[in-house]
């Protein structure tokens, strides 16, 4: 099922008011309406989006293609969710992800993200994106290849974001992902990443994970190196975010 809608643009966390109803129509299969209030699309064109129906269930597909417009030093097709929390909270982010068999993969294994948690201006003290420093997000989920196997990896830390560990992905299979983060500007911060039915995280890290004490927003989908010119797709479903402790 496809939607013939005007182009949707969202280059920062606030959604474009004129396109809000259209944004919500794409976000609806991915997350509950209460969570969609905090969400928006970060795509350069309507061609980056599709709602796919399979066995009576709908889910969001994000697409990247050769020649698409670049956004902020890379190519992206993402959903952004500015879920509110306070420093010291532990937040769980859970969703389902599938990479179709015919989706392109980079033979040079350059950087390619499937998820990121990004700092932003602190609106409580009047900061804005004007002049705000651009930094590598302190928590990242990367996609790539290790010894010929596709993997998803966790990178962590502020100010230096370093690789932690990875686990294998399988094409054409829905994977359940869960990332638990205890948010902190201090040494007591931590993150744990799980996939499918794991009882033990495939990656965990400790230490500072906030550049400032204002909520860092979550982005999922695809964001990749500007020299990667491939047609690729990722499918997303059942996004849930909740605070589990204060």
Image (cartoon, rainbow, N blue to C red):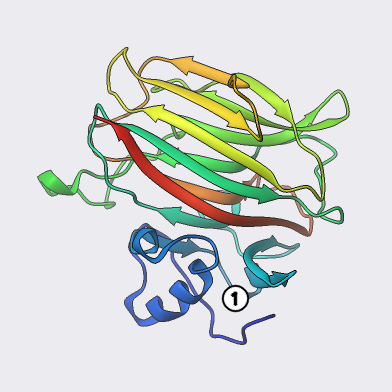
Where residue 235 appears, as percent x and y from the top left, is: 67, 57
Count how many numbered circles sit on residues in the image: 1
Query: Is residue 133 found left or right of 48 in the rendered image?
Result: left
Q: Residue at x 55, y 28 (%)?
A: 193
Locate the C terminus by quadrant.
top left
Along the viewing direction, whichever of 66 and 10 lies nearer the viewer: 10
- Residue 188 placement: quadrant: top left
Q: Residue at x 37, y 25 (%)?
A: 209
Q: Residues within 10 Å of mark 1 (few under 14, many from 20)?
A: some
Q: Quadrant of residue 212?
A: top left
**Quadrant where the N terminus lies?**
bottom right
Q: Is residue 16 above or below residue 141?
A: below
Q: Is residue 24 left or right of residue 71?
A: left
Q: Which residue corresponds to the image point at 22% horizontal and 36% vertical from the top-left?
A: 86
Q: Nearer the viewer, residue 104 or 188?
A: 188
Disc 1 is placed on an element classified as: helix
Q: Which residue is mark 1?
A: 46
Return the x and y of residue 190 as percentages of the image width and height: 41, 20
Residue 161 in percent (x, y) is at 49, 23
Q: Position of residue 154 (x, y in %)?
A: 58, 27
Taking depth in this image into account, of 80 and 172 the one nearest to the observer is: 172
């Amino acid at each position: 099922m496809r939607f013939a809608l005007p182009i949707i643009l969202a280059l920062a966390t606030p959604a474009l008011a004129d396109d809000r109803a259209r944004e919500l129509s794409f976000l609806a299969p991915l997350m509950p309406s209460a969570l969609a209030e905090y969400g928006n699309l970060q795509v350069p064109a309507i061609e980056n989006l599709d709602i796919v129906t399979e066995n009576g269930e709908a889910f969001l597909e994000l697409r990247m293609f050769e020649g698409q417009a670049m956004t902020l030093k890379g190519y992206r097709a993402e959903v952004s969710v500015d879920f509110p929390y306070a420093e010291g909270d532990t937040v769980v982010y859970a969703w389902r992800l599938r990479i179709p068999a015919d989706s392109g993969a980079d033979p040079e294994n350059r950087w390619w993200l499937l998820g990121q948690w990004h700092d932003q201006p602190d609106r409580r003290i009047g900061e804005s994106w004007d002049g705000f420093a651009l930094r590598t997000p302190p928590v990242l989920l990367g996609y790539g290849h290790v010894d010929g196997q596709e993997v998803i990896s966790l990178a962590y830390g502020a100010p230096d974001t370093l690789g932690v560990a990875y686990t294998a992905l399988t094409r054409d299979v829905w994977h359940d992902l869960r990332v638990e983060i205890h948010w902190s500007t201090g040494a007591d911060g931590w993150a744990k990443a799980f996939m499918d039915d794991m009882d033990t995280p495939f990656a965990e890290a400790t230490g500072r994970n906030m550049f400032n004490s204002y909520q860092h927003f979550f982005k999922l989908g695809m964001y990749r190196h500007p020299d990667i010119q491939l047609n690729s797709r990722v499918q997303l479903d059942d996004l849930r975010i909740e605070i589990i402790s204060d």
